[in-house]
Image (spheres, grey):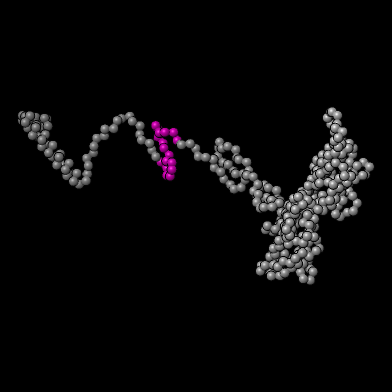
Amino acid sequence: MRAWWQSKGDVAPSNTMKTQIDSLTLKTLGMIAAVLCGSGMLLPSASHAKSGAPPPPILTGSGGPPIITGSGNPPPPPPPPPVVTGSGAPPIVTGSGNPPPPPPPPPVVTGSGAPPIVTGSGNPPPPWAGGTGDLPTGSSESLTVRIAFTAASGTTTSANGVLQAIGINGADHGSLALHTTGLATGTYTMSAVTETGTAPVTLGTFDVRAPGGAGTPNPAAPPRGGRSNTRFGGPRGIPFPDGFDPFDISSLAISDSNANVLFTADLTTVTDGVFDARAPLVSGTGVTAKGSAAIHVCAKGGVVDGTLRVRASGLPASTTYTYAVDGTDVGTVTTGAAGSLRLVATEKPSGGSLPASVNLFTVTEVTVHDSSGNVILSASF
């Protein structure tokens, strides 16, 4: 502006005039600002941020947690856990740096009674694999009997033992543990008579050694003799003869080297023992039924408590049949409206539904027949 005044050859404005011009300029700017504010426009403002400060973090990505990038940010979160995929055992673990996979889960055991039903991958199939539903197509038996021998000579010697047997699908295995006291030093023989034979079968021999220890024996005391612990059958015992069935024993005898019988035991009457058996039912001619029969019996101190169960399906509805045990008719049973058969017969101390002549420890066959004598169902133990 100084140059403009000078170009006109006039004198430069005085200080009073400069003040008036500055005042007019401020008023003009104020009016412009008021108009802009009324129209919603804002004048730009100066920034007072400090120079050199790091930029704020940049958040990217959707979901949680956000991904934080940029300098000066906190460290990223830890990596996600291993990814486990696949069903069954063992699981398939993927990802780098993962620990080795865990061992496979144990077999799943379901069902009650003996033997249990084992299911699940990697488990051995049950003995009756291939059955329909919960009705097995195989058989199983288990027997445990405590034996108290009777001394034939009436001496103070004694003998006792435990017979154990198990059979699956007709393959029978067992062992006989024998314990004697008071016998003289020597060799003795154990023999058995079976239910299907008449001549004794020699199971093996055992030795009785002289008692150990020092000192003078008491002459007033009966001769103690040596003791013996012998096992016949089983993986560590004296092998049974070929074809010998431990379920088939009816009596046992122990004799000395001169063939004198010293002890006997009758196994047809069990005083202390447990017997469990299960067998599939075989349908008769013209019948397509299926089912199973089971026996559970326990004896303690001569008191016997047992149950015979038969269940089947696929029979004519609302029909009455007769059931027999070892060829002797015992009672009747009627099928339901859907053709199912449910039979429960008991042997009780106070008298069950089975007659006293039936011994569940020795039952070998159960049959169901119609009024004409035709066998509808049968099971063998």
Residue under the image location 81 percent in, 53 percent down: 269
Q: Main secondary structure of the magenta part?
A: loop
Which quarter of the image is occupied by the C terminus? bottom right
Residue under the image location 43 percent in, 43 percent down: 64
- Numbered disc total: 0
Instruction: Indicate left or right for 180 with 34 as reference.
Output: right
Residue under the image location 69 percent in, 70 percent down: 318
Question: For the view shown, which residue lies furthest in the bottom direction?
Answer: 372
Q: Is residue 37 visible?
A: yes
Task: Using the image, determine if residue 98 lies above or below residue 341.
Answer: above
Asked whether 27 falls inside the magenta stretch, the response is no
Question: For the view shown, which residue lies furthest in the top direction?
Answer: 215
Residue under the image location 83 percent in, 39 percent down: 181
Instruction: Indicate left or right for 2 with 115 as reference.
Output: left
Task: Identify which residue, 242 or 335, lies in the foreground.
Answer: 335
Instruction: Indicate left or right for 20 with 60 as reference.
Output: left
Q: Is residue 208 visible?
A: no
Task: Specify start and end residues of the magenta stretch as a single range.
Answer: 60-76
Residue 275: horizontal and vertical position, in percent? Answer: 75, 52
Task: Identify which residue, 131 or 141, lies in the foreground.
Answer: 141
Which quarter of the image is occupied by the N terminus? top left
Residue 102: horizontal and vertical position, in percent? Answer: 60, 40
Residue 141: horizontal and vertical position, in percent? Answer: 76, 52
Question: For the view shown, which residue lies furthest in the front direction?
Answer: 220
Task: Identify which residue, 301 or 139, lies in the foreground.
Answer: 301
Residue 288, picture quadrant: bottom right
Task: Identify which residue, 32 or 34, lies in the foreground.
Answer: 34
Asked whether 74 falls inside the magenta stretch, the response is yes
Residue 65: horizontal and vertical position, in percent? Answer: 43, 41
